[in-house]
Amino acid sequence: MMKKIVILGAGTAGTMMANKLYRNLNSDVWQITIVDKDPQHYYQPGFLFIPFGVYRPEQVVKPKKDFLPKGVVFSISEVVKINPENNHVDLSDGTSLNYDILIVATGTTPVPEETEGLKGDLWYKDIFDFYTFEGSRRLAQKLETWEGGNLVINLAETIIKCPVAPLEFTFLADAFFTEKGIRDKVNITYVTPLSGAFTKPKTTALLSKLMEEKNIAVVPDFYLQRVDNERKVLVSYDELEVPFDLLISIPVNKGDQVIENSNMGDEDGLNFIPTDKYTLQHKTFENIFVLGDATNLPTSKAGSVAHFEAEILTDNILSYINGQPLEAKFDGHANCFIETGYGKGTLIDFNYTTEPLPGKFPFAGVGPMSLLKVNRANHFGKLAFKWVYWHLLLTGKKLPVSTNMSMAGKIVEEQP
Amino acid sequence: METLTLAGTAVDVNAEGYLTNMDQWTPELAREMAAQYNIELTDKHFEVLNWLRAKQKEGAQLSIRKLGNSGIVDIKQFYALFPGGPLKISSKLAGIPKPASCI
């Protein structure tokens, strides 16, 4: 009888795993099935550019099946429950799938309903998200005709997908309104539950300076309790208020509903799955592995993280199949471009223990990208990444970037 | 690392005043630290501090939301107990490190 690997979620993480495992396993012995309710694959980093008219919506969508190997079974179905004790998952059509190994890559979604008043009368009128295909398109329409006022960017929670995207949105908005000639009519305020623009000291220093140069006000330590639609103000748990005319919200992010249905989330109540931060094995069930945004790992929820995790997890699943110890260890490596507007960007590279440092990337001394510096090369790196994503990354091809973070090219202490 | 004398004992703290060894913590020390924030610690405060210490020992990632789900206080009450920055202040008073955000 064939052995079965079931992958839940055919987003960035699940698609990479399907490709890597298919290439590494004997298809006479192992059958790989990947399940997702949506037949379309979205290039999520592109959502950031849609509101400003840089990308058209159709540029970021392609059929999922184009990126999956022919020998992998692609099931377009909704998963309603995982039964880890009995090694099967239930689908919404009443059937179930048995597995020997389960890989959970169900991602995360913004849930505006979690915050009182966020998805109220003003939703998609004066309140928008940009982390969804629909939100980014609606916002593009709004920005075409908006004439100015208080623009507020707010993070409702600290654990969110792509933690640098709200900053990028803010910088791009500054450039967008400047180029449109109405920047003097727009007050931009960045309202965050964090203690500053970012968390790691060197990155925060760089970003805070940019915020100041671009005349963007930062309101730190603001934990959103509710949105008052009538008065158009954000209200925090300690009753501070920030007024807005146009609110760009990054709602509370939650893991998939199936995690809640299966009672597999951690204590935050956000449906993220307790996962070993080094091996990516489920904390309780040894034949379940988790990667991408679905985990509760203390690193960024980002495509680069999913990519590095997929390399580690492929090794560990092969070890698991061969009855060997899981020796590949994920170090929390993340690599993020940060658009700063006007055709420039910066780049950060970090892991569980090392904060982003300045230097050159990916080749020591050469670059061509620069870490923690704002320049054009980083911006072109970001734009070029779209091609890399569709043509190399999803299908699991090798990229010239090391899986574990490398100190080569990094400057630990800058010369005074 | 610096040394601070609190409640008659010398304890090790970092530059931001967080204890670097949670075993040096005592309830008296917490009371003295709390006075600097004009907080008088009640049983409810101590329930929160003990919960934080237990979670820290388990190696859990701490967050305001997690505390809100703890059954001890909701988020609103948490802010009322430790006005300003509830998680940062309560972690300091609990003798555990400042909660790191993971991004």
Image: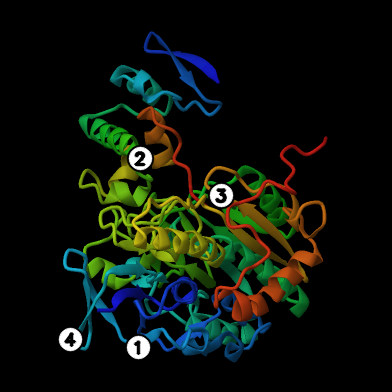
Identify the secondary structure beneath mark 3: loop
Does label 4 or label 3 sit earlier along the sequence?
4
Identified by mark 2, the residue type is Gly
Chain of the residue on which disc 1 is drawn = A
Residue assigned mark 1:
A76
Q: How many numbered marks, from 0 up?
A: 4
Is the residue marked by circle 1 packed among few (<14), some (14-19), or many (20+) residues within 10 Å? some
Does label 1 or label 4 sit earlier along the sequence?
1
Asked whether the beta carbons under mark 1 and mark 2 sit within 8 Å of each other, the answer is no
Chain of the residue on which disc 2 is drawn = B
| Residue at the outermost top position | B8
Asked whether the beta carbons under mark 1 and mark 3 sit within 8 Å of each other, the answer is no
Left or right: B48, with A201 as reference point: left
Disc ID at residue A351: 3
Disc ID at residue B89: none
Is the residue marked by circle 4 packed among few (<14), some (14-19), or many (20+) residues within 10 Å? few
Is the residue marked by circle 3 packed among few (<14), some (14-19), or many (20+) residues within 10 Å? many
Left or right: B49, with A293 as reference point: left
Left or right: A391, with A276 as reference point: right
Chain of the residue on which disc 3 is drawn = A
Disc ID at residue A94: 4
Identify the secondary structure beneath mark 4: loop
- For the residues beneath circles 4 and 3, the answer to whether they share a chain is yes
Mark nearer the viewer, 2 or 4: 4
Q: CA distance from mark 1 to mark 3?
A: 35 Å
Chain of the residue on which disc 4 is drawn = A
Residue assigned mark 2:
B59
Q: Quadrant of the N terminus of chain A?
A: bottom left
